[in-house]
Amino acid sequence: MIATRVTQRAYAAGVAAGRIWGSGDNYLVGLGEATPLTTAYALEPTELIIDRPAVVAAGGVHSLALDASGSVWSWGSNDNGQLGLVAGTLEPGAAAQRPYKVDKLADVIAIAAGTYHSLALRADGVVWAWGSNERGQLGDATTTGRSLPVRVKGFGPIVAIAAGLDFSLALDLEGRVWAWGANGHGQLGDGTIQDRLLPVGTSAKLDEVVAISACGGGGEHSLALRADGTVWGWGFNGHGQLGDGTTSDRRSPKPCSVTDAIGIGAGAWHSLILLSDGAVKAAGANESGQLGDGTTSDRKALDFVTVAEGDDPDPYIPLTGVVEVAAGGWHNLARIVDGSVRAWGTGNGGRMGTGTEADHPDAVFVQEASDVDDDAAYVGAPAAEMSAIGAGAMHSLMIRTTETGAGGSGTVTSMPWAWGSGSSGQIIGNTSPPYAPYALTFAPPAPYIDLPGTGIAAEDRHRAPARSPWSTSRGSDRRVRRSRSDGSTGSP
């Protein structure tokens, strides 16, 4: 997944906080403790913070954030140097339990968190990469891992980036797609299954692309949205996630059967497409209900994501009013025009934000805590006024933006949130409850005046809160595993 900086002067007088949920084993939450959460926790700011989050994104076993000044922050697992920190910042093998600023990066406008590597796009169109490089996903013509950012070589000005399982994507100024890294299933789209240490263009004449997507939570396929509303896919297709009616891998981009798309989201083994009328279609793996069609049957062709409707004998009707989608490893989010958020798919680790760890094969409302001070009074209420969402392998993110005052002269507050397991501390803050069934607020460390600003990217498992009435610790989470010969990356 990616996060792009959106600078808005209105935020200059505001504070920011947020919500993130899911599971995390490597302090990806940044709260300093390992904590499982099944509801969203939100940052509860202790002081004014300028230009805080406007966009969120999620990926694999670490987290990234982009602030309004163009600096990048990271926390969580650093096993592969994916945090971009100078030597000595952390003890060897240690995870970052709070955000650290990535060294030697400035004027960044977008970030992307792959499963074990990271990308940043600067305003000058140059892409920088760091972390694992076993398959050449850093694009520096080597397979040497990097703990500090290195420049990706071989192409011109870039306007968007995305990161998957050991591979990377970029979109240039002319609307062309570039890719590098792992290519065992053709996910680079160059007509081969040969890994690439430098960026290569897609083999088909795929132009006028306006958006790209890959899943840092374990995906090995790629999606591209063209200006004409068509969606093209390539790479691993073992579950029909390319939506072309087959389960055959594609080494070059092929169109699927939509012509009115305005958004895309690549999951681990499934795909989402947002249509111009606000409906969502999905295809691919569905063992946990990640297609949102009310079943657990895989689909090779796109079909509507649904919601339950009263006591109707056939209760599932298409979900509508969607303005943004986010595909995680095995779960999904949809932001609705009224500011609410719905989730569907795997519930393990609290990814649904519904108060339980149950799977949901149809889209349900994400819940936030209405009271965190009293166990008996702690109940969930549908999240509202959300302005951005992001989904990782086992966690989710969202931001609430509100304005006080009239006539556009008031204070804008941007609040990030989180929920699920906090076992890796992957949400920004300084404490973590062991378990919470709804979205909750959490407090950032007081010393961080310049905390992450306009974007958050998370890898594999992130979520955590600051305080919780629960003390029951949950079972350990499973990490995204590297791909097997059949193209899978392990169960959710």
Image (spheres, rainbow, N blue to C red):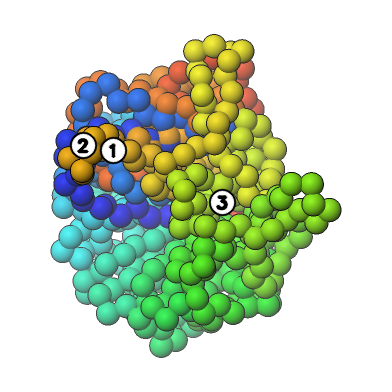
- 3D distance between C-alphas at marks 3 and 2: 33 Å
* Percent position of residue 288, x then y: 70, 50
* Percent position of residue 130, x then y: 31, 52
Which comes before the other along the chain, label 1 or label 3? 3
Q: Nearer the viewer, residue 31 or 105?
A: 31
Q: What's under tag 2, amino acid-wise?
A: Gly
**Residue 488 visible in rendering:** no
Q: What's under tag 1, amino acid-wise?
A: Glu
In percent of the image, x 34 and y 68: which residue is there? 170
Residue found at the very far front of the displayed protein: 406
Secondary structure beneath disc 2?
loop
Q: Which residue is mark 2?
A: 410
Image marks 2 and 1: residues in contact by CB distance under 8 Å: yes
In percent of the image, x 52 and y 57: which residue is there? 321
Please tell me in which quadrant of the rendered image residue 95 appears: top left
- Which of labels 1 and 3 is toward the front? 1
Secondary structure beneath disc 3?
strand
Residue found at the very far bottom of the displayed protein: 205
Q: Which residue is mark 3?
A: 332
- 3D distance between C-alphas at marks 2 and 1: 6 Å
Report the disc number at residue 403: 1
Q: Is residue 373 left or right of residue 455?
A: right
User: In the displayed structure, would residue 204 be above or below residue 226?
Assistant: below
Which comes before the other along the chain, label 2 or label 1? 1
Q: Report the number of discs.
A: 3
Sort mark 2 into few (<14), some (14-19) or many (20+) by Cα contacts within 10 Å: some
